[in-house]
Image (cartoon, rainbow, N blue to C red):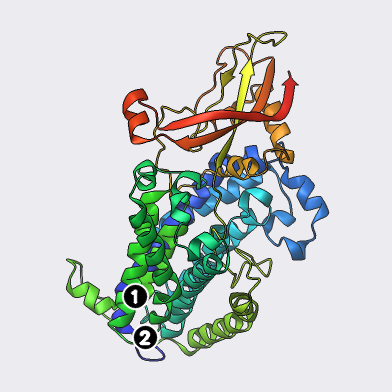
């Protein structure tokens, strides 16, 4: 690639930009579905109270000016509409400066949401989307050839995602070095998918091969992303195949999908175009105007300066996972599953309409969309959509004796039969009148064996562990 422009990368740019826009669209749609219940004015962790105690510099965004559920809906619907337009090609239908403004506006809208989302938005893929979205501002449109510098900034992001995930595993739980973590991980991961039961029951030598292949894909292959073609393309292909394997084995919101999309920046676009039935490149791709080149170089200098702390973290024996070093979520550190849980605990919410519960009380269970509950229900595929409440229930179960502060509020909303809260659940066992009492119990879940599956028709086996919260009364 020329150091200034890469005309042959037009297809790579198209895939990356349209793909990032689609992920933005999913993120805003998820926010419209969940945010008011989780962090709205009457949310489980209300945003207005958060904004009163957090200064602008720690949570910059539009809602520092004013927050209301109506203002949030306006921002989220505007973000969804703008993301849909960019996914459909609006960025290539307007002048270069206007396209940059559209991408910048989309980034600001989602930054405003993330920075007041608190625990519900404290996931590494939120920062990954914001960092990727920021880079899209400087990737240009059909008015110019793709800027080489920005393509390498995208590759640098993929490199940090992959290497960070590989190093945190190698330095973390010894089972990664022993190649035994996947004996447990498919069963204990936050939100299993429809194929996770089969992945869990693969022969143990295959689990060891999975872990070894993961080390190669995340510790060695990322360096090849910076090598000349066709090596970089093959490295990107390994990243994409590895991420597809993760997509098949579980639900990790848009982390895997966005990583695959960004990895396309390292693909030889001309080679890809020759093997796909696609229209040719734009008729003309003149050199970028001087002001755009200067803007790109400035952005690259900012990324280089902000890379100091993430690089230091990558080199540190005390490496941290998924941390944003600034409130703009630019140039973050990434990584996942440095430790693996060996047992799966689930918090199950159960209610009863009886005035005074006793030994013979029949308790009815609230069912969630993604997290395990009914032992006969096959886990579903939700990624790249993000079910934040289900994910936080998994985190809450990691400390079965220390209830999460928001969980009591969730139970209170269920005792009140709050319609918005109930819409986040798969089933409401009390459709006619709210329960009189709700309790939170901890169960140990494990996948059934193939024989148990044949004999009982269940995917899970569960045993009670104890009480998570005392019974609350309506």
* Contact check, label 2 and label 1, Cβ < 8 Å: yes
Secondary structure under the numbered disc 2 in the rendered image: loop
438 displayed left or right of 340? right
Q: Is residue 158 above or below residue 446?
A: below
Residue 92 in view of the camera? no
Give the x, y percent position of residue 298.
57, 85
Give the x, y percent position of residue 174.
54, 62
Secondary structure under the numbered disc 1 in the rendered image: helix
Q: Quadrant of the C terminus?
A: top right
Q: Quadrant of residue 397?
A: top right
Alpha carbon separation for disc pair 2 and 1: 9 Å
Residue 264 in view of the camera? yes
The residue shown at (60%, 16%) is 363
Total labels drawn:
2
Q: Is residue 141 above or below residue 242?
A: below
Q: Quadrant of the N terminus?
A: bottom left
The residue shown at (57%, 16%) is 430
Q: Nearer the viewer, residue 123 or 28?
A: 123
Residue beneath disc 2? 227
Q: Nearer the viewer, residue 433 or 159?
A: 159
Q: Residues within 10 Å of mark 2 (few under 14, many from 20)?
A: few
Residue beneath disc 1? 235
Q: Is residue 203 above or below residue 227?
A: above
Give the x, y percent position of residue 351.
63, 19
Q: Nearer the viewer, residue 304 or 168?
A: 168
Give the x, y percent position of residue 349.
61, 27
Q: Quadrant of residue 237?
A: bottom left
Looking at the image, is mark 2 or mark 1 earlier in the sequence?
2
Q: Residues within 10 Å of mark 1 (few under 14, many from 20)?
A: many
143 displayed left or right of 353? left
């Amino acid at each position: 690639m020329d150091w200034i422009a890469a005309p042959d990368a037009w297809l790579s740019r198209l895939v990356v930009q349209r793909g990032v826009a689609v992920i933005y669209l999913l993120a805003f749609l998820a926010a419209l579905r969940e945010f008011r219940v989780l962090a709205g004015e009457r949310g489980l962790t209300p945003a207005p109270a958060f904004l009163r105690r957090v200064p602008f510099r720690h949570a910059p965004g539009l809602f520092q000016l004013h927050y209301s559920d109506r203002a949030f809906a306006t921002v989220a619907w505007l973000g969804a509409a703008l993301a849909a337009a960019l996914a459909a090609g609006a960025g290539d239908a307007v002048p270069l400066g206007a396209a940059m403004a559209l991408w910048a506006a989309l980034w600001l809208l989602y930054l405003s949401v993330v920075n007041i989302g608190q625990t519900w938005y404290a996931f590494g893929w939120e920062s990954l989307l914001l960092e990727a979205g920021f880079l899209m501002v400087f990737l240009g449109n059909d008015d110019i050839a793709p800027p080489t510098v920005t393509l390498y900034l995208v590759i640098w992001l993929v490199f940090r995602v992959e290497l960070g995930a590989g190093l945190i595993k190698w330095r973390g739980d010894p089972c990664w070095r022993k190649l035994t973590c996947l004996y447990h991980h498919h069963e204990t991961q936050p939100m299993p998918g429809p194929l996770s039961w089969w992945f869990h029951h693969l022969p143990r030598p295959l689990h060891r091969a999975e872990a070894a292949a993961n080390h190669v894909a995340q510790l060695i292959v990322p360096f090849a992303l910076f090598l000349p073609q066709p090596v970089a393309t093959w490295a990107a292909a390994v990243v994409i195949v590895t991420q597809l394997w993760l997509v098949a084995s579980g639900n990790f919101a848009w982390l895997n999908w966005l990583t695959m999309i960004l990895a396309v920046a390292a693909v030889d676009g001309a080679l890809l175009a020759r093997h796909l039935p696609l229209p040719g490149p734009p008729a003309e791709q003149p050199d970028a105007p001087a002001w755009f080149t200067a803007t790109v170089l400035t952005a690259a200098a900012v990324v280089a300066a902000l890379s100091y702390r993430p690089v230091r973290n990558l080199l540190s024996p005390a490496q941290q996972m998924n941390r944003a070093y600034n409130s703009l979520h630019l140039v973050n550190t990434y990584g996942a599953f440095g430790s693996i849980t060996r047992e799966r605990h689930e918090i199950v919410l159960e209610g009863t309409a009886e005035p005074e519960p006793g030994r013979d009380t029949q308790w009815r269970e609230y069912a969630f969309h993604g997290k395990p509950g009914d032992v006969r229900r096959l886990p579903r595929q939700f990624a790249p959509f993000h079910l934040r409440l289900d994910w936080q229930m998994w985190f809450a179960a990691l400390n079965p004796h220390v209830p999460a502060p928001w969980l009591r509020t969730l139970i209170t909303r269920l005792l009140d039969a709050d319609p918005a809260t109930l819409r986040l659940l798969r089933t409401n066992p009390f459709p006619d009148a709210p329960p009189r009492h709700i309790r939170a119990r901890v169960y140990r879940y494990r996948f059934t064996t193939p024989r148990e599956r044949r004999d009982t028709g269940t995917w899970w086996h569960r045993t009670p562990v104890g009480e998570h919260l005392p019974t609350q009364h309506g």
